[in-house]
Amino acid sequence: MADAKTINPNAPTSETVLAVKHFTDKTFSFSLTRPPSFKFRSGEFIMIGLMGEVKGRVKPILRAYSIASPSWDEKLDFYSIKVEDGPLTSMLQHIKVGDKVLLGKKPVGTLVCDAVLKGKRLFLFSTGTGIAPFASLIRDPEAYEKYEQIILTHTCREVGELKYGYEIVEAARKDPLLLDIFGEDFGQKLHHIPTVTREDFAMKGRITNLMESGELFKHVPGGAFNPAHDRAMICGSMDMTLDTKALMEKFGLTEGSVSRPSTFVIEKAFVG
Ligand code: A2P
């Protein structure tokens, strides 16, 4: 019989894979069962993992993953990069429906509505798999109650990498819960601005450059950036996060946190 002292209440739970979808040779999404006791705020992240061998010993290999489904959903969605020699993603990219994945117990994070003050427009700036927490937020009614317009930007190197973004935006616009609360015209509150840096595309360039040139603001309702009522969340690589943060500060916003809400928040995207 297990000794009560050896049972760790924070130990990950073992969840079942419900779906897997491969988007490109570098990205895939998957869904897991959600334990009834697992509570989180839309936009938070959690440790995800598999048992693996590290220096000859089998142990849990866990990495931080943004939850890509909203807090009210029955299942948990994730969007992951595939790193060929990554300790976790080299194994995780091969999961199949019915497999087990470890799920941590303590969701945390700053990309939550509680950390950003009320405003008119909420900009969600993402690159690559940094879009994942925003897949959660754009399906949460709270975001649309707090902000009149939500502008999701997603910048990738290649056009093919934008597909996940198109799918989550379409799913949000058709979400029965959001349509029920906000009515038929609800889709007009959500704006999707995909941009590409290394291939030809309608909107070409880094989001930082598109903001500095003013190009982005020609394509969003409300025009130029206004710190009096614009708010932002940032999620991408370390460089993108820091450059976009500097730009927000130049535009007159100040960084907030859950304990001190302000006008923008950041979180770097995690590499599984
Ligand atoms: P670029 O192709 O000009 O490097 P990555 O895969 O390296 O994380 O990049 C994802 C996307 O983020 C790419 O389109 C890339 O543009 C863009 N990006 C990379 N660094 C920055 C940065 N410092 N500021 C804004 N966008 C960036």
Image: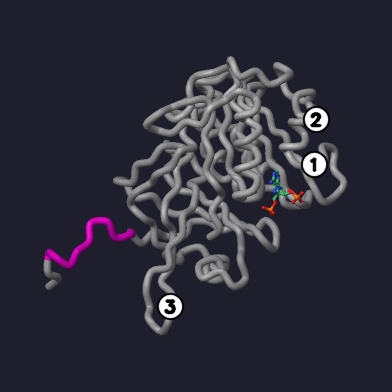
> Residue 124's x, y, as percent?
61, 34
Helix, strand or loop: magenta stretch:
loop
Q: For the residues labelled 1 and 2, say whether their Cβ atoms are less than 8 Å apart.
A: yes
Marks 3 and 2, Cα distance to the nearest angstrom? Answer: 48 Å
In this figure, which residue is indicated by the disc labeled 1?
205
Q: Foreground residue, 63 or 77?
A: 63
- Mark number displayed over residue 269: none
In percent of width and height, residue 244 lies at: 64, 37
Residue 126 in the image: state x and y as whole percent: 63, 41
Q: What residue is shown at x 44% (from left), y 58% (from top)?
A: 48
Check the image and name the residue furthest to the right.
200
Give the magenta range. Answer: 4-12
What residue is drawn where x is 78% and y is 26%? 214
Q: Nearer the viewer, mark 1 or mark 2?
A: 2
Residue at image position (70%, 16%) is 222
Asked whether mark 1 and ligand 1 are closer than 8 Å, the reply comes as yes
Q: Disc 2, ligand 1: is the CB inside 8 Å?
A: no
Q: CA distance from mark 1 to mark 2?
A: 11 Å
N-term mark: 1 or 3: 3
- In the rendered structure, which amino acid carries the disc numbered 1? Gly
Residue 146, placed above or below residue 132: above
Quarter of the image where one finds residue 195? top right
Please report whichever mark, 3 or 2, sits nearer to the chain's N-terminal start. 3
- Say if the magenta span includes residue 253: no
Tell me the element at label 1.
loop
Check disc 3 and give the amino acid type: Val
Residue 54's disc is 3
The residue that label 2 is drawn on is 213
Q: Is residue 177 left or right of residue 173?
A: left
